Amino acid sequence: MMRDGYTARWRGREYEASPDGDEVRLYQPEPGDGFTEARPGRFVRVVPATEVDDLAYVRTTCSWQGQPFIVLAAHDSWLRVEYTGGRWPIAQSMGLEAFDFGVYQGWAPAHEVTDLREHRI
């Protein structure tokens, strides 16, 4: 599983989450008690932040062609990655897209990616 976003533990279960001041939005893919459909296949429940046992940002990192990356998404046998090495000549030589100033992203074949790790921030 490639995760890049907030998670919250509430009532013994971990959810995708979005903090918003004194509240936290919890998300799950199926209907549940107190969850309303935000869009097909995505249900949300807003709870007070004081009821959340744990709130953290989870990020997946990896190496590709010997360089450090963050994994943003997965699609079929590809990973959407963002270069974190900070050296534009390397990003350019790898054929990465300039997503923003100093931000380089691309699609990496999943079988070429190594050292996948999940970090809680």
Image (cartoon, rainbow, N blue to C red):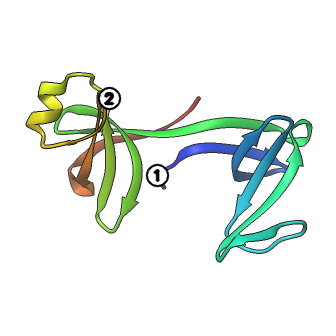
Q: Secondary structure at mark 1?
A: loop
Report whether 60 appears left or right of 96: right
* Residue at the front extreme, as displayed: 101
Establish if 106 lies above or below 41.
above
Residue drawn where x is 90% and y is 66% of the image: 34
Establish if 16 lies above or below 115.
below
CA neighbours of label 2 inside 10 A, class few (<14), some (14 to 19), many (20+): some
| Residue bearing mark 2 | 84
Report whether 104 appears left or right of 16: left
Instruction: Check disc 2 and give the amino acid type.
Output: Thr
Establish if 52 lies above or below 36.
above
Q: Nearer the viewer, residue 5 or 13?
A: 5
Query: Which x, y percent locates residue 44?
Result: 77, 62
| Residue 11 visible (yes or no) | no
Report whether 110 appears left or right of 39: left
Instruction: Tell me the quarter of the image containing the C terminus.
Output: top right
| Residue 100 visible (yes or no) | yes
Query: Which x, y percent locates residue 102?
Result: 29, 27
Q: Nearer the viewer, residue 44 or 52?
A: 44
| Residue bearing mark 1 | 2
* Residue at the left extreme, as displayed: 93
Q: Quadrant of residue 99?
A: top left
Residue drawn where x is 25% and y is 53% of the image: 107
Residue drawn where x is 12% and y is 34% of the image: 92
Query: Which x, y percent locates residue 31?
Result: 78, 74
Compute the Cα span from label 1 to label 2.
17 Å
Residue drawn where x is 50% and y is 39% of the image: 59
CA neighbours of label 1 inside 10 A, class few (<14), some (14 to 19), many (20+): some
Query: Which x, y percent locates residue 116?
Result: 37, 42
Instruction: Check disc 1 and give the amino acid type.
Output: Met
